[in-house]
Image: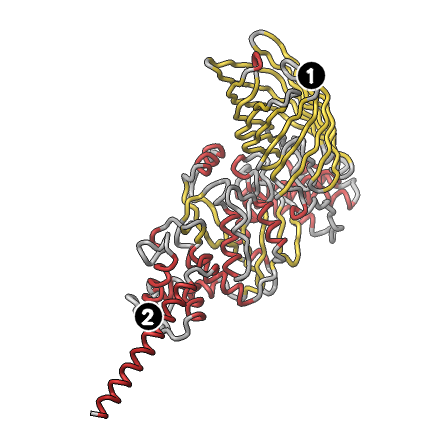
């Protein structure tokens, strides 16, 4: 009897301990399901995962419930349905490592993960990771904000043999306007991919003529491993791609946050994610240890061209590769002409302006002549302002004129009345700009709304001949001081240098209020930058024919930088029914 009582007592004690352990385990799971890092691994924000592919979740409600997804992951790790690459152990290595770290009592058996091991081998010897920022592509609406990706650098820093982690919309669409529209509405699936870095260099620097900023990140070996593990988890799944917020720059932040547990990169970006803003946020988080500027092939080509004295001779040599043309010139001039010819030949090759056979024959002749002349002097190309230090992309401005106060609110991005300090000259894009007016009677009224206004003043020269253009969609005060919907387009040409830009464009404007109103005219735009782009003069003059009448409209102003995020503006404007002088202040913030 006494023996049976002891047995019962022991069983009750074991049951109590078991229940206690079970309760503690359940409480631990409940607590850790709310852990920030677990939410990072699920891309969980605002009540749901931002990954839209159902195959990413192990529980049917895992997209909306981190606790259920954590329980399902643990169950699949302890009781695997598969014992190969299809197992949770192999498909979700970042989840598995984090769970093993926080639940060391689980019975998780090691699996053989061939695909994961092969992928790690293909990108082994990673020493550092760098954030890459190809800057604005001035003539492409889909790329006017720039792009960000990650580069996996080996110990030798042989960048052309490195791999890049890219996030992009999966589409074959070539029309930039269609791409932008689909991107605005979530019409594409976005995915991560790992590709050779030289292909991205060729795409951005060579083909699209975009400068590239490279930021080395101070991630340690373990943090790099965390990032790679998480990349392996998510790269086979997709999310809806949105041009404004859930884009390349936003999705790269998830990867960086998975690398280092205490980062808070993603929380700030809800309504818009601009590459420059994410780079500044990464900089503020002390992730950047070094930066490097890589000039585009176009800049290098034009720099060599500018150093040549006899430019006609240079073009004749490039067209003929006749070495007799180089007989009576200096060695320095020969070097510049040959270097220019090599860059021009590569440019023609990337643009498919020359056959492969002709390209190789020309290249061999140029290289053989160039090899006889010795080393080059260092080619100096002025480095633009680091994007980390440019003005914020949000703007609030106040303007005073004729006892009226005008208020402007703009969440994106860069306008002609903003200083180009660190931005691409001639590349202007505004989204959702709102202008309000308070008159002398303190009455508030709507002045105009710009849904989007894109201005591309791409400068032409002897070699490159892009078209300048403008598209403006929104609402404005027009005839009889009434509000009209508007679609304005213009096309033309631009010329200039680093400080001066002037453009002439033909305008075609369509407005609507009960009826459509078509007008056309000429727009002359010019700006002159001073003090290393810390101030500038701007002339924006239009002659527009409206209902058989010609109207002269213009805006002349001077902008002066007070500090990085504060500008002073003075100007004179002539509108359809009024003209006035004005004073203004603009404040920028991230």
Task: Identify the residue at horizontal 52%, vertical 14% (top origin).
Answer: 518
Compare residues 109 and 45 and report the one nearer the observer.
Answer: 45
Q: Earlier in the sequence, mark 2 or mark 1?
A: 2
Image coordinates of residue 321 in percent, x first then y, are 65, 40
Compare residues 327 and 173 and report the one nearer the observer.
Answer: 173
Q: Label 1's element?
A: strand
Task: Identify the residue at horizontal 58%, vertical 53% (top origin).
Answer: 131
Please give left or right for residue 154 compared with residue 333 in the image. Answer: left
89 in relation to 425, above or below: below
Image coordinates of residue 365 in percent, x first then y, are 64, 46
Compare residues 289 and 112 and report the one nearer the observer.
Answer: 289
Q: Label 2's element?
A: helix
Image coordinates of residue 267 in percent, x first then y, are 52, 51
| Label disc, if present, on residue 579 of the rendered structure | 1
Compare residues 419 and 467 and report the one nearer the observer.
Answer: 419
Q: In the rendered image, which quarter is residue 56 located in?
A: bottom left
182 in relation to 45, above or below: above
Q: Which residue occupies the extreme top position in the image?
A: 548
Image coordinates of residue 329 in percent, x first then y, are 78, 41
Q: Which residue occupies the extreme bottom position in the image?
A: 2
Q: Which residue is mark 2?
A: 78
Position of the C terminus, as image quadrant, is top right
Instruction: Sort mark 1 into few (<14), some (14-19) or many (20+) by Cα contacts within 10 Å.
Output: some
């Amino acid at each position: 009897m006494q023996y049976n009582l002891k047995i019962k007592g022991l069983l009750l004690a074991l049951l109590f301990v078991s229940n206690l352990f079970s309760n503690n385990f359940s409480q631990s799971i409940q607590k850790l399901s709310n852990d920030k890092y677990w939410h990072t691994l699920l891309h969980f924000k605002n009540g749901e995962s931002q990954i839209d592919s159902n195959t990413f979740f192990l529980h049917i409600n895992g997209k909306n419930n981190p606790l259920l997804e954590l329980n399902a992951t643990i169950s699949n790790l302890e009781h695997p349905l598969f014992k190969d690459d299809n197992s949770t152990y192999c498909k979700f290595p970042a989840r598995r490592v984090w769970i093993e770290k926080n639940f060391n009592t689980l019975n998780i058996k090691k699996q053989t993960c061939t695909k994961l091991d092969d992928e790690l081998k293909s990108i082994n010897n990673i020493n550092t990771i760098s954030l890459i920022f190809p800057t604005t592509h001035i003539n492409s609406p889909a790329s006017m904000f720039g792009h960000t990706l990650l580069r996996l650098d080996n110990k030798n820093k042989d960048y052309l043999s490195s791999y890049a982690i890219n996030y992009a919309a999966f589409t074959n669409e070539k029309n930039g306007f269609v791409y932008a529209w689909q991107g605005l509405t979530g019409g594409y699936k976005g995915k991560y991919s790992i590709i050779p870095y030289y292909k991205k260099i060729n795409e951005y620097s060579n083909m699209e003529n975009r400068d590239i900023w490279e930021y080395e990140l101070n991630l340690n070996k373990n943090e790099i491993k965390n990032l790679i593990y998480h990349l392996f988890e998510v790269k086979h799944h997709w999310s809806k791609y949105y041009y404004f917020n859930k884009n390349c720059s936003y999705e790269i932040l998830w990867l960086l946050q998975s690398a280092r547990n205490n980062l808070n990169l993603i929380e700030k970006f809800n309504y818009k994610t601009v590459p420059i803003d994410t780079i500044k946020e990464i900089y503020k988080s002390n992730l950047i240890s070094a930066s490097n500027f890589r000039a585009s092939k176009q800049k290098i080509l034009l720099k060599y061209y500018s150093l040549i004295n006899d430019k006609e001779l240079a073009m004749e040599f490039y067209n003929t590769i006749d070495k007799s043309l180089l007989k009576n010139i200096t060695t320095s001039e020969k070097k510049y002409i040959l270097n220019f010819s090599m860059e021009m030949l590569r440019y023609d090759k990337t643009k498919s302006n020359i056959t492969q056979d002709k390209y190789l024959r020309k290249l061999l002749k140029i290289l053989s002549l160039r090899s006889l002349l010795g080393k080059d002097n260092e080619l100096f190309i002025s480095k633009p302002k680091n994007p980390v230090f440019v003005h914020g992309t949000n703007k609030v401005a106040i303007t005073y004129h004729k006892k009226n106060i005008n208020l402007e609110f703009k969440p994106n991005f860069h306008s002609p009345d903003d200083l180009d300090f660190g931005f691409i000259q001639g590349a202007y894009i505004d989204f959702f700009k709102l202008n309000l007016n308070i008159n002398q009677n303190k009455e508030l009224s709507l002045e105009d709304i710009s849904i989007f206004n894109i201005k591309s003043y791409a400068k032409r020269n002897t070699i490159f001949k892009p078209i300048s253009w403008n598209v403006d969609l929104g609402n404005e005060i027009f005839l009889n001081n009434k509000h009209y919907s508007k679609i304005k387009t213009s096309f033309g040409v631009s010329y200039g240098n680093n400080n001066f830009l002037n453009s002439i464009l033909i305008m075609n404007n369509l407005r609507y209020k009960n009826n459509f109103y078509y007008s056309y005219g000429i727009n002359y735009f010019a700006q002159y930058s001073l003090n290393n782009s810390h101030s500038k003069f701007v002339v924006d003059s239009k002659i527009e024919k409206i209902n058989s009448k010609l109207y002269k409209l213009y805006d002349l102003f001077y902008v002066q930088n007070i500090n990085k995020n504060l500008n002073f503006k003075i100007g004179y404007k002539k509108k359809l029914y009024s003209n006035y002088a004005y004073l203004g202040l603009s404040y920028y913030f991230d």
